[in-house]
Image (spheres, grey):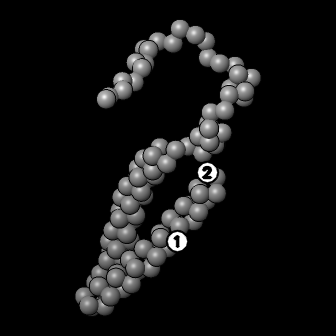
Amino acid sequence: MRVSRPRRRKHAKHAAPTAQVLAAMDLGHHNRCSRTPRRHRTKGFMKEIIVYSIAAIASLGLLAYSIHMFIGGLVSAGLEKTIIIGAVLLGAVIIGLLARDVIRTRAKTR
């Protein structure tokens, strides 16, 4: 047999409960916990990952292009490519360390 849930009212007819009423009620762990639910935290976190990834890719591309402009005609093409690859890898490691620091800092504040 199927049990129907009570319908929710669209507009509350009563005022919000006072702090004393809320304190007297045992509403479980979720209302006492100051942290936001996981589904709300991951939504913002995914947006940050996308924005940081776009910024990191653009920065690494700009780094590679600036190295090409500085040493493009001064050294051979093979050496230029090696230097660019090394600089981009070093830049990626530095960006990864900065991202790890941001994640640790955010985890401490949440």
Q: Amino acid at mark 2?
A: Arg
Residue 97, placed above or below residue 14: below
Task: Of the two numbered discs 2 and 1 on the same chain, state the one appearing first in sequence.
Answer: 1
Q: Which label number is shown at residue 110?
A: 2
Q: Residue at x 32, y 71 (%)?
A: 65
Q: Where residue 105 sits: x, y (%)?
A: 61, 59
Question: Does dot 1 land on a helix, a strand or a loop?
Answer: helix
Q: Residue at x 40, y 64 (%)?
A: 56
Residue 56, placed above or below residue 6: below
Q: Quadrant of residue 32?
A: top right
Q: Where residue 69 sits: x, y (%)?
A: 32, 75
Can residue 87 be spotted in the picture? yes
Q: 29 or 98: which is nearer to us? A: 29
Q: Amino acid at mark 1?
A: Leu
Q: Residue at x 40, y 18 (%)?
A: 7
Residue 32, placed above or below residue 46: above
Question: Does dot 2 land on a helix, a strand or a loop?
Answer: loop
Q: Going by the picture, which residue comes out furthest to the left?
A: 77
Residue 60, placed above or below residue 32: below
Q: Which label number is shown at residue 97?
A: 1
Q: CA distance from mark 2 to mark 1?
A: 20 Å
